[in-house]
Image (cartoon, rainbow, N blue to C red):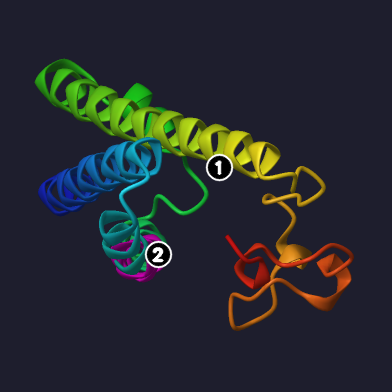
Amino acid sequence: MNNYDEFYDFMEQYTDFYAEVSENEKLKMDALASEDLELINKVLADYQVFVSKAENYEKRREELFKKIGLDGKTFREIVDAESGDRREELEDLFCDFRDAVIAARDYNSRSLDIVKKNLKEMGMQDYDINDPACYDKSGNVSEKFHTMQNILDRQA
């Protein structure tokens, strides 16, 4: 592959980013499990930064792949096309990348399970937290989902 070093360096940075995302997802899960509101607020604020960075990385990946003639190829296909030491090096990086993405997804899934459980305990199981229509642009519960009293409007 031409531009091997450029490709490898970028994918190494991308892998490090997903390792950081994974750590943040674990922190989010721990914060939700402990119901530490201060930590939850911090993690959610950080989440917005990660979303922006993820979009930027994906845009840069697409541009790089196009530039070096890998447009439309997956990381797995690129690894499989190499041989020798390069293939081994890329295989290790691929496994690190895959593991970081899987860990981030797992922590996120467990976080969603915690939120669903807490909503159910509060009598709000009718909210589908995975439905983007549940929230408006400001992050508030949309009118469509105001059929029951907002938990923030309840008195203790």
At x 76%, y 74%, the residue is 142
At x 24%, y 21%, the residue is 91
At x 76%, y 52%, the residue is 127
Q: Position of residue 12 (x, y in %)?
A: 16, 44
Amino acid type indicated by mark 1: Val
Q: Quadrant of residue 43?
A: bottom left
Q: Quadrant of residue 39?
A: bottom left
Q: Which residue is disc 1 drawn over?
A: 115
Amino acid type indicated by mark 2: Val
Q: Secondary structure at mark 1?
A: helix
Q: Is 116 placed above or below 92 here?
A: below
Q: Which residue is disc 2 drawn over?
A: 51
- Count numbered badges in the picture: 2
Q: Quadrant of residue 147?
A: bottom right
Q: Is residue 51 magenta?
A: yes
At x 66%, y 45%, the residue is 122
How crowded pointer 1 is (Cα within 10 Å; few <14, some 14-19, many 20+) is rated as: some
Could you tell which of marks 1 and 2 lies nearer the N-terminus? 2
Q: Position of residue 63 (x, y in %)?
A: 37, 67
